[in-house]
Image (tube, rainbow, N blue to C red):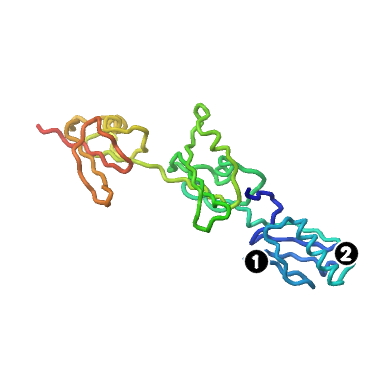
Amino acid sequence: MMETRSDVVGEGDQLIITVFGQPDLSADVVVGSMGIITLPLVGAMEVKGKSTMDVAIQFANKLEQGQYLINPKVAVRIGQQISRNFSVFGEVVRPGRFPMQGQLNVLDALSLAGGLTTRADKSVKLLRKNAGADQDAAEVDTMQIEFENNKNSEKLMQKILPNDVLVVGQQKTFYVYGEVRRPGSYPMEEAMNVMRVLAVGGGVSERGSSSRIVIHRKDKHGELIEMPANIKDVVLPGDVVVVNERIF
């Protein structure tokens, strides 16, 4: 099981080490990339993955074994805990890395990042390193931000672990142009079709024809294709629906 205790030391963490009665032996150090710190008299110590109490005992034992002090009293605490960060990227107000402050869930993490922007999709992707896996391996979970009837509440309340990454995508849109009353770009809805597109666009204008509609869509090779459409045809993200003039 992955260790989640807040006193576990990791790379980049700041350790404030106090040897009581011996200010010259006290230290303020940062854990190096190999999980090693260097302390007065005893030199290098490997501390990655150990608790602050374990580090204190290790330093005290080395001081006593080296006959520098008899029964030394050592205390260790973590200042900045860089190793216990999580990240939020994409369409949030303040994207970036954030320190773990107690136990956080997905909604807490999004709140610390300032919440979603107006361009945000209503889905969040969670990336997590698999224990024991290489650096490229990741476990992916995608959840919808929906509160109606407690939808996805269990997923949204799941705990964030150190080094988790949340990614909020940009809202998917479609476009409607030509002879409609409100042309422009609009957010996608579920089960979108041409009839709904026309409704969102304010309806067909007096000059337009509901039987002369085309959809411009990119194929799997990225090439733009044009297709004649009727009101029941499905509309996909990125589609451009064009309503042409009536033939008089």
Q: Which element type, helix, strand or loop, lies under badge 2?
A: loop
Q: Amino acid at mark 1?
A: Gly
Q: How many marks?
A: 2
Give how far across and how far down residue 70 sits, in percent: 90, 67
Give how far across and how far down residue 73 sits, in percent: 86, 61
> Which residue does the image show at 77% across and 56% down from the upper left?
53
Q: Is residue 43 left or right of residue 114?
A: right
Give how far across and how far down residue 35 sits, in percent: 66, 64
**Residue 167 or 37: which is nearer the viewer?**
37
Q: Residue extending furthest left?
A: 248
Q: Amino acid at mark 2?
A: Gly
> Which residue does the image show at 23% across and 43% down from the upper left?
216
Q: Above or below — where is 45 with respect to 229?
A: below
> Which residue does the image show at 52% across and 50% down from the upper left?
95
Mark number displayed over residue 51: none
Considering the image in quadrants, where does the C terminus appear?
A: top left
Q: Is residue 61 left or right of residue 108?
A: right
> Which residue does the image show at 49% across and 36% down from the upper left?
145
* Quadrant hosting residue 27: bottom right
Read off the residue under disc 2. Answer: 21
Read off the residue under disc 1. Answer: 32
* Quadrant hosting residue 31: bottom right
Crowd rating for badge 1 (residues with CA inside 10 Å; few <14, some 14–19, many 20+): some
Crowd rating for badge 2 (residues with CA inside 10 Å; few <14, some 14–19, many 20+): few
Q: Residue extending furthest top?
A: 149
Q: Above or below — where is 156 with respect to 12?
A: above
Q: Earlier in the sequence, mark 1 or mark 2?
A: 2
**Residue 208 or 155: which is nearer the viewer?**
155
Q: Above or below — where is 195 with respect to 228?
A: above
Q: From mark 1 to mark 2, how far is it between C-alphas?
A: 27 Å
Q: Which element type, helix, strand or loop, lies under badge 1?
A: loop
